[in-house]
Image (cartoon, helix red, strand yellow):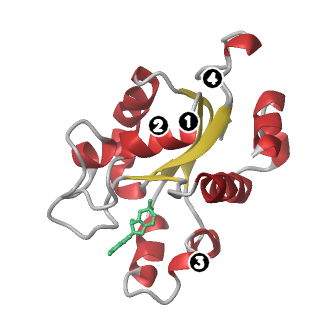
Amino acid sequence: MVDHQLGTTLPQELYADEITLGIVKPHAYSHRMAIENMITKSGLLIPVRKFPYTISPSLARLHYEEHHGKYFYEALVEMMTSGPSEIMIVEGENAIQRLADLSGETDPRSAATGTIRHRFGQKDGQIMYNAFHRSFDPDPSKARRAVKREITLYFDREELPPHIAELLDAL
Ligand code: CMP
């Protein structure tokens, strides 16, 4: 199911200028409302959500292909396809960096207090149980390419409201 509720009642001129992708991972799916609250309380919008959404093995492999060959790749694919996820587009000024900051460090044990991964990542488990994926790269132009690639993997263009499709084109 694709849901267009959160944030879509705001007038167009209030929409900020950047979008990014977030995924609540299967092991954290039961916390998806709390994670959404953290995001919206930070001032970001969630204009499009897809849930419950079980990622197929072929899609997980494609999404994480840069990790192909690493020791955790097969286990990561297995975990990401093990149950429902929530896929979301997050919107706001400087949304890519802000969602990365709110997510916290990849390893939940290193994630700062107040971040999603600190709160919901498994600190006694493997790094992949870090509750939340966000599109990111420290190089801003690579980050924008990653966001565009990943949103296109999870959403067909016709599922997107027109202003989100425009922001996607602008990446
Ligand atoms: P994510 O944001 O989903 O993007 C890539 C994922 O690979 C990352 O979060 C972790 O889930 C996983 N990952 C990265 N490094 C490791 C690691 N050293 N061990 C296990 N999983 C990892």
Give 102 or 76, whichever is nearer the viewer: 102
Give 49 or 130, whichever is nearer the viewer: 130
Q: Secondary structure at mark 3?
A: helix
Q: Is residue 118 left or right of residue 68?
A: left
Q: Earlier in the sequence, mark 1 or mark 3?
A: 3
The residue to which callout 2 is attached is 98
Q: Amino acid at mark 3?
A: Glu
Q: Earlier in the sequence, mark 2 or mark 4?
A: 4
Residue 62 x %, y % = 64, 73
Q: Secondary structure at mark 2?
A: helix
Q: Amino acid at mark 1?
A: Ala
Q: Are marks 2 and 1 in contact (CB under 8 Å)?
A: yes
Q: Are marks 1 and 3 in contact (CB under 8 Å)?
A: no
Could you tell me how far apart the alpha carbons at marks 3 and 2 are, in whole angstroms? Answer: 25 Å
Q: Secondary structure at mark 1?
A: helix
Could you tell me how far apart the alpha carbons at marks 3 and 4 are, in whole angstroms? Answer: 32 Å
Name the front one of labels 3 and 4: 3
Q: Earlier in the sequence, mark 4 or mark 1?
A: 4
Disc 2 crowd rating (10 Å Cα; few below 14, some 14-19, many 20+) is some
Q: Is residue 68 left or right of residue 100?
A: right
The residue to which callout 1 is attached is 95
The residue to which callout 3 is attached is 65
Report the residue at 49% width, 90% height from top. Answer: 69
Name the front one of labels 3 and 2: 2
Residue 51 in view, yes or no: no
Q: Amino acid at mark 4?
A: Gln
Name the front one of labels 2 and 4: 2
